[in-house]
Image: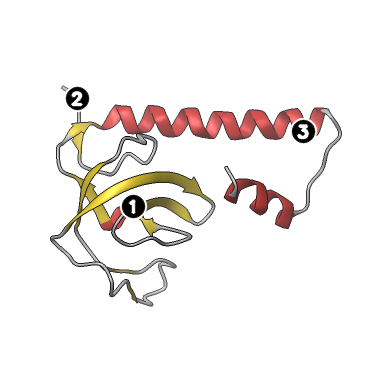
Amino acid sequence: MNQQTKKVNIFNQEKRWILCIANEHDYLGDGTIICEEELQVGKQYTFVKGEAQSYGSMVHLQELPCKYGYQSYLFEELQSYDAQILEKEYNNWLKEKLDEGERCMKEGRCYSLEEVREMLEHR
């Protein structure tokens, strides 16, 4: 039996509705609660873009444009789907990033941490 999930699939770039399930979160895991006051729990928002970043899996919303987006765990898909789909998509993304790093090393290209962050932000 396939495990079902409602986690937002940030790799599915199809424009669609997603549901806000929280507007407070402990991003750093240290007990400090961050409140995204502009988000309304229980409201549906239009997903326009998703991306994996060093600071999390981010969603971008039509109704609330934001340079960095919002953490995907503050939302859920309206319909359940097979969790293996998200796992496969994430693994493909990670493999692509690791392959890119290996190519750079073989070519003798080395980047500073800041350069790597800049490249990841503009993907």
- Where is residue 22 shown, x and y percent of the image? 22, 63
Indicate left or right for 58 with 96 as reference: left
From what the image shows, is residue 116 above or below residue 64? Answer: above
Of residues 65 and 87, which is closer to you in this image?
65
- In this view, which residue lies farthest toward the top? 1
- The structure residue drawn at horizontal position 37% and vertical position 51%, both measured from the top left corner, is 59
**Mark 2 or mark 3: whose residue is earlier in sequence:** 2
Q: Are marks 1 and 3 in contact (CB under 8 Å)?
A: no
Which image quadrant is residue 40 in?
A: bottom left
Name the secondary structure under disc 3. helix
Mark 1 and mark 2: Cα distance apart in space: 22 Å
Q: Amino acid at mark 1?
A: Ser
Q: Amino acid at mark 2?
A: Asn
From what the image shows, is residue 107 above or below residue 32? Answer: above
The residue that label 1 is drawn on is 72
- The structure residue drawn at horizontal position 66% and vertical position 53%, both measured from the top left corner, is 118
Name the secondary structure under disc 2. loop
From what the image shows, is residue 52 above or below residue 25? Answer: above
- Where is residue 17 shown, x and y percent of the image? 21, 45
- The structure residue drawn at horizontal position 78% and vertical position 53%, both measured from the top left corner, is 112
The residue that label 2 is drawn on is 2
The residue that label 3 is drawn on is 104
Q: Amino acid at mark 3?
A: Cys
Mark 1 and mark 3: Cα distance apart in space: 30 Å
